Image: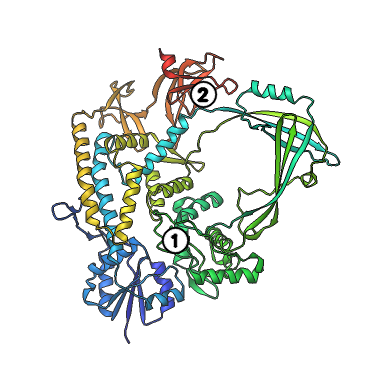
Amino acid sequence: MSTKLVIVESPAKAKTIQKFLGKSYKVIASNGHVRDLPKSTMGIDFENDYEPKYITIRGKGEILAQLRKEVKKADRVYLATDPDREGEAISWHLYNALKLQDKKCSRITFNEITKDAIKNSLKNSRDIDMNLVDAQQARRVLDRIVGYKISPILWSKIKRGLSAGRVQSVALRIIYDREKEINDFIPDEYWSISAELELDGNKKPLEAHFTGDKNGKIELHGKEEVDNILKELEGAAYEVLGVKRGERRKKPPLPFTTSTLQQEASRKLNMSTQKTMRLAQELYEGVPIKGRGTIGLITYLRTDSTRISEQADANCKEYIKNIYGEQFVGEGTFKKSKSGKIQDAHEAIRPTDPELEPSAVKEELSRDLFRLYQLVWNRFIASRMSEAVYETISVKIGAGDYRFSLSGARMKFDGFMTVYQCDDEKSTMNPALKKLNEESHLLLKELKPQQHFTQPPGHFTEASLVKTLEELGIGRPSTYSPTITTLLGRRYIVKENKNLYMTELGEAVNEMTVKGFPSIVNVNFTANMESLLDGVEEGKVKWKTIVENFYPDMNEAVEAAEKELAEVTIADEVSDEICEECGQNMVIKYGPHGKFLACPGFPDCKNTKPYYEKIGVACPKCGKDVVLKKTKKGRKYFGCIDNPDCDFMSWQKPSSVRCKECGGMMVEKGRKLVCTNQDCGYVTNKENENE
């Protein structure tokens, strides 16, 4: 009997597929890549048309030996690695490492691991797509050049063990720029006025909001302006000038892409991008389900497309019709507008079978696997359902020459929201609103002025960073999670309560890469490079042409940076702290968590202590020095050197200048000094105060 060998990437996937194919097939895993560029050297022959020098990955010799034995026994070999650039490259490396040129060998791909999908892939086998392979080779070579050229400069300037990356360094710069924007933010004052109104026969008052006067909108910026309006409103009669009744429709959400799955899993399930991708991989590769055996529950997890196959769309709509009714079936398919940043290589992430409801598989799944599957299932079902419909009422109210408004919305038909709730969607309507008309008699109960201040942009979370990277065209679905994981692992950033913060080490690395390689650590450059890689995949661009155009400029920048560094003596900075063990002045060094003090007499004297950088400002509570400190995770802040006896701390750098208005503490925000007393809010330029 003829034997057919199927080579996949992971043992879990091999186990699932083996059950579908039977005894005439043998499914075996390569455990990912088997060949790569060497770690010890650059691995690129610059003199020979940038040819990569691939070697067997350490520890993969036994796996390759086993694969070669199986290849000898087989009449035909199918390479069934993942359906993307990386998977295509793994198949190509296997083809060469196993010397399959003289074998009947085909490439098969599938978007889901189900029996039908696997059988169909065997019927539609093809040759290896060298455009996909070359796109991956281009990415790998470019990343190697950037990493191996810039990283040694970071080692000599800061400390060994640091790394730079084509996408990683740009992501770090984006986080740094957001942190700077937050730190430099100056809040602006604004006011609002709400009117609490009573309608005859209703216990619950209506709350209307000031919008302006009869001539149009008015923005309120100060208390004096508000007081004048309140004075003019004294004794004014409140009357309904118009009631507008209408209907608002909310479209169902699109099915998940890699990016939106990571964002929603973070927002709704509090999962990191790394955890989300690990669990999604499990759901894709196969889970034992009672009565069905081991099957993949979701489709391929690395995609930037919202496209759904016609068959999947029809099956889902039939399920919705049977379970919820005809009126819940969506009329059309809502699609995301396609831009040049979207590859659209695979379908969106969806359940492989809509009839496998989360409740039916709950007992077979761990808690987190169940929650993620439920999220994917709910989102896909909702994407094929009808719009939610709201009844809306908006009312315009006159009070003399001034105008107020109030509005409300009530769910009329929940549509897709039967299965997928949008947290930002509120359905609130005061019953009294429905009774309002031009004849209604309104009585003012109270006017409520309120002071507000504009807020800075939020710190990045993993989810919002992924969204930004996608919008800017930085990286691709497969790179978002590894990029963030690397930044966290290197301690360039830390995560506290979901928020991402720069560490002192991260700031030092970012400063060095931006200063030395401004064209490389550039959002537009990196996004354009991704477009060029897409061009390789489409067969429009030769991959070595990209490297050929990129390398000379990169090499020139490295040589310039090395020359600049060669003129600088890199020596440990001597502090005024005296070593208690041997009496020498301690020096400032960089460790895994940033700066620390060490005795220069090492190894004879191994004394170390935390390094606190004095900023030349007295503590406003006790008068001792304010120093730069770090939280346990590495986030910078300013605190009293006498902590824990003194608990003063500030996220912004305190100034030695006191507020001229109230005498309060001022903090630095970019080129401004801002009073920390919110009731004061005094702002001045640093230059003015230093003159």
Tell me what residue is drawn at x 56 percent, y 51 percent: 268
* Viewer-closest of 472 and 489: 472
Q: Does residue 55 appear to the left or right of 658 in the view shown?
A: left
Rendered position, 192 above or below 262 = above
Identify the residue at image location x=25%, y=57%: 543
Q: Nearer the viewer, residue 451 or 357?
A: 451
Q: Is any atom of residue 39 visible in this view?
A: no
Extreme left residue here? 47
Q: Residues within 10 Å of mark 1 (few under 14, many from 20)?
A: many
Residue 376 vertical placement versus 608 (above, below): below
Mark 1 or 2, nearer chain start: 1
Which residue position is annotated with label 1? 301
Q: Which residue is mark 2?
A: 648
Left-right relation of 197 to 380: right
Q: Position of residue 111 (x, y in %)?
A: 43, 67
Residue 321 falls left or right of residue 599:
right
Distance in Å between CA atoms under marks 1 and 2: 47 Å
Q: Residues within 10 Å of mark 2 (few under 14, many from 20)?
A: some
Tag 2: amino acid: Phe
Q: Is residue 456 visible?
A: yes
Q: Of 487 and 320, which appears nearest the observer?
A: 320
Q: Position of residue 102 (x, y in %)?
A: 21, 76
Q: Secondary structure at mark 1?
A: loop
Q: Quadrant of the C terminus?
A: top left
Residue sitting at x 36%, y 43%: 523
As helix, strand or loop, the secondary structure at mark 2 comes to loop
Find the residue positioned furthest to the bottom: 1
| Residue nearest the viewer, comparing 625 with 251 | 251
